[in-house]
Structure formats: C-alpha cells, structure tokens
Image (cartoon, rainbow, N blue to C red):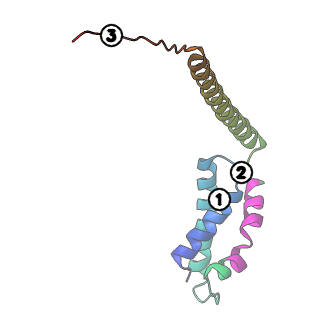
Amino acid sequence: MMLANDLKTYYDEVRRYLDCPKDEQDRLLLSVNKQVIELQVDNPNLDYDLDYDGIVEFLGEPESLAASLIECLSPDVIQVYHKKKKRKHARLVACIVVVIVALSLSSVCAILAKSQAEFTQSDIVIITNH
C-alpha cells in the first residue's frame, strides 16, 4: 500500500515540473491519482514496496511524468499561461524599479537639503554691570 506522505511528496515534486496553470496541475495529478487507485483496486496483490522510491519505480521519475502530462495539454493553454507569467514578472520588475528610483530620489533630495543648509556662527559679547 502507498504511504500518503510519500505519494504527496511525489506529487509535489511532479508539480514543480508542471509548467502550467495550477488548476491544470490539479486536474492532471487527480487523473494520475485515479489511475493509481484503480490499479491498486484491480491488483490487490501487487507486490510493490511503495514508499517514495517504490512510487518512483511505479510511476517513473517526477520530471518524466510531468513531461508526459504536459504533452496532454493544449498548446494554447500553455501559451496563455506563459504570457501571463511573463506579464506578472514584468510587473514585478517594474515595481522594483519604481521603488529603487523613489528611494534614490528621496536620498538625493535629503542630501541636497542637508548640503543647502547654512550654519552661521556669530560671536556676541554681552557686558553687563552688576
């Protein structure tokens, strides 16, 4: 019998290689899980030691499984996902640039304000009679 933690670890590893939307990842992994359950039900005497290594032996390396699952997806789904991902990265870079520019400008303004400040000293002697 497969250990749930080992199977979760395996699926998490497969997910790392699935370069597609999360809902597609969920759908693909659910499909694999259904097949695993069906195989276990159909073959109760299956002689596998299904810890993590057994799962890899049973389903293949996570990267290989992910590659075969990606092939099942429409190229349009992947293309739209990659475009969204690129836009998200571009927005993140733009925000970082804006923050850097704002911090730089505020530093320059503070330095200029400090350099324009004038300090004068005058010597005044007050003499009083007591």
Q: Is residue 78 left or right of residue 30?
A: right
Could you tell me residue 27's position as x and y percent? 60, 54
Packing grade of label 1 (10 A; few <14, some 14-19, many >=20) is many
> Could you say which disc has been placed on residue 127 in the image?
3
Question: Residue 52, labelled with which disc?
Answer: none
Residue annotated with mark 2: 19
Indicate which label's residue lies in the foreground, 2 or 3.
Answer: 3
For residue 69, what is the image quadrant?
bottom right
Q: Which amino acid lies under the numbered mark 2 shown in the image of this protein? A: Asp
Q: Secondary structure at mark 2?
A: loop
The mark tally for this picture is 3
Disc 2/disc 3 C-alpha distance (Å): 85 Å
Give, as a single range, the part of the protein colored magenta.
Answer: 56-70
Element carrying mark 3: loop
- The amino acid pointed to by label 3 is Ile
Q: Is residue 8 left or right of residue 16?
A: left
Query: Where is residue 112, by image quadrant?
Result: top right
Residue 130 position, x and y percent, is 21, 12
Image location (x, y in percent) of residue 121: 50, 14
